[in-house]
Image (cartoon, helix red, strand yellow):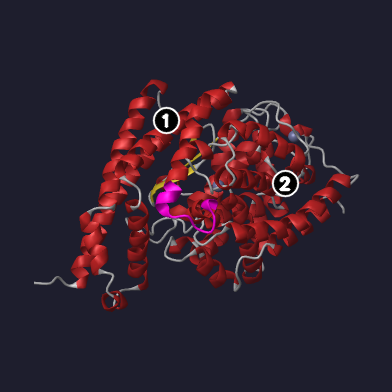
């Protein structure tokens, strides 16, 4: 007797729940590796991760999955399903086809390597030891090159990688968007640097007690509506957020005793990621749709909270007093206005995650160009420090004094995340575009922030973005919210307006 579509759908959902259980366990182990797992346990833990990844992978490409997807290939059956169920099946199909194209033993080998490589990167960064890390990175790149063949080369080899983080994103599109952005940001940066008015910020680099930093960060996270019963804050070398399930969305930060801003803004940033994951519709829980729709949209949420809200004047009108209470000595002679200007100073710097809103995009363009060279132009891994330093000199006028402050600064490549960096700038662009609509629909936006009423903003974002998880594509989402496709002019407008005032241009 043939089974009804409802039963088969339940069977598929059950299979997906099983897959998601592995993903959650693996995610928790990754979190553990990055938040203080004993060093001597790394090798065996990496093998455990490799083992679980293989089991998970087997389910994803199982005959049962294949058979279910074949059943749902029937347009008649698909037509009777809800939009969400159709999206769920499409998502399974994409994953199935992508995963089936790579042999299982390759995946296993690769996932063990990637887990080890992340730990060795941490060590290499701490010891300024690029040579020690190079063999791992070389293997990671070789694997990715091989995977590109399995996945299928799109317009260029690097296009295949971009598409994994931002569906439908291409080198051609990015070249265009980055080109338009550069054309407006570079002259703006020149005007800022030529301005006789430069905010002072030496007070940001006094000695700031780490315990107090932590207390203030926790306070801000509560204010923005981060649910501590569905998450926790820890410390790691490189701040990150990880959504294990909608009820367990963890974030980390990194405290720097001589930089009071670093932990504040990384907490707001990761908090923004976490709000997205914590507020995905319950209906999607346990499915492949219970995550952010793309890395770019995810970044738009972290950046909206970090920069567009967290670096705004109304925000510090409300919260500066609280910060002063945590650091009465350090900030006793600093006015709110001085502090606001200091948090928005534009400074050519070496470290991406410490960069201001404007030059940040240049840090990304550098990485984008280097990745294109690695995957499309045969750049060798051993040449990375050299190319890296040349580009920093050319774009930002600086040469890193060490590889730790240069090519080793980011975790991404150690985990094989090539094609990811572009998402950060896409996030800035999406965020500015979303902000323009948000301001139109919520004329009291600034007043809300100045009163510390951040929850209406969180609710607006929940309704427009968070609840949908992955059930809407990035372009569907951005068009539904703003009425147009990605447009880099919103970001350029926002930055021009902000810095014209701050630097009295
Ligand atoms: Zn400084
Ligand atoms: Zn982020």
In the picture shown, does residue 401 fall above or below 267?
above
Q: Residue at point 21% right, 61% down?
A: 11
Residue pointed to by mark 2: 359
**Are discs 2 and 1 less than 8 Å apart at CB?**
no
Q: Secondary structure at mark 1?
A: helix
Q: Residue furthest toward the left? A: 1
Q: Residue at x 54, y 64 (%)?
A: 460
Among the 4 quarters of the image, the one containing residue 24: top left
**Residue 149 shown in magenta:** yes
Percent across and percent down for residue 312 are 70, 52
Residue range (magenta) = 147-158
- Displayed quadrant of residue 22: top left
Residue 276 among those drawn in magenta: no
Mark number for residue 104? none
Q: Is residue 211 left or right of residue 242?
A: right
Image quarter in which the C terminus is found? bottom right
Q: Is residue 51 visible?
A: yes
Q: How far across and how far down the image is residue 77, in percent?
A: 26, 75
User: Which disc is residue 116 wearing?
Assistant: 1
Identify the secondary structure beneath mark 2: loop
Quadrant that contains the N terminus: bottom left
Q: Residues within 10 Å of mark 2 (few under 14, many from 20)?
A: many
Mark 2 or 1, closer to the camera: 1
């Amino acid at each position: 007797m043939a089974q009804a579509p409802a039963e088969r759908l339940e069977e598929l959902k059950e299979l997906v729940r099983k897959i998601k259980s592995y993903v959650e366990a693996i995610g928790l182990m990754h979190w553990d590796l990055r938040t203080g797992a004993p060093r001597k346990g790394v090798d065996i833990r990496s093998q455990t991760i490799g083992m679980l990844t293989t089991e998970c992978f087997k389910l994803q490409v199982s005959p049962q999955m294949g058979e279910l997807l074949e059943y749902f290939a029937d347009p008649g059956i698909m037509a009777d399903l809800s939009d969400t169920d159709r999206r769920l099946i499409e998502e399974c199909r994409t994953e199935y086809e992508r995963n089936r194209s790579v042999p299982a033993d390759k995946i296993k080998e690769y996932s063990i390597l990637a887990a080890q490589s992340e730990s060795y990167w941490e060590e290499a960064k701490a010891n300024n030891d690029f040579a020690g890390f190079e063999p791992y990175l070389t293997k990671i790149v070789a694997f990715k090159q091989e995977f590109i063949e399995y996945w299928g080369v799109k317009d260029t080899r690097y296009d295949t990688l971009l598409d994994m983080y931002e569906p439908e994103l291409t080198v051609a599109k990015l070249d265009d968007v980055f080109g338009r952005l550069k054309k407006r940001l570079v002259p703006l940066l020149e005007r800022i640097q030529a301005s006789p008015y430069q905010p002072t910020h030496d007070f940001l680099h006094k000695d700031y007690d780490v315990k107090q930093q932590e207390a203030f960060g926790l306070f801000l996270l509560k204010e923005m509506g981060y649910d501590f019963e569905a998450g926790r804050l820890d410390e790691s070398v490189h701040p990150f957020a990880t959504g294990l399930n909608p009820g367990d969305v963890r974030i980390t930060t990194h405290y720097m005793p001589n930089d009071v801003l670093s932990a504040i803004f990384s907490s707001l940033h990761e908090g923004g990621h976490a709000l997205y994951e914590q507020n995905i519709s319950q209906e999607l829980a346990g499915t492949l749709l219970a995550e952010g729709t793309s890395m770019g949209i995810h970044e738009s949420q972290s950046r909206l909270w970090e920069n567009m809200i967290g670096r705004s004047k109304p925000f510090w009108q409300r919260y500066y007093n609280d910060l002063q209470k945590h650091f009465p000595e350090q900030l006793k002679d600093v006015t709110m206005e001085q502090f606001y200007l200091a948090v928005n100073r534009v400074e050519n710097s070496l470290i991406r995650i410490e960069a201001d809103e404007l030059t940040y995009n240049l840090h990304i363009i550098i990485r984008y160009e280097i990745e294109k060279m690695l995957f499309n132009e045969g750049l060798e891994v051993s040449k990375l420090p050299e190319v890296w330093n040349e580009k920093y000199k050319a774009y930002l006028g600086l040469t890193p004094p060490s590889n730790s402050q240069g090519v080793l600064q980011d975790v991404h490549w150690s985990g094989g995340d090539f094609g990811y960096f572009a998402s950060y700038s896409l996030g800035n662009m999406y965020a500015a575009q979303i902000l323009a609509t948000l301001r139109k629909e919520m004329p009291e936006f600034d007043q809300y922030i100045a009163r510390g009423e951040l929850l209406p903003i969180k609710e607006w974002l929940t309704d427009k973005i968070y609840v949908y998880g992955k059930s809407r594509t990035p372009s569907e989402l951005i068009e539904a919210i703003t009425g147009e496709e990605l447009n880099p002019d919103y970001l350029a407008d926002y930055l021009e307006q902000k810095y014209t005032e701050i630097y009295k241009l």
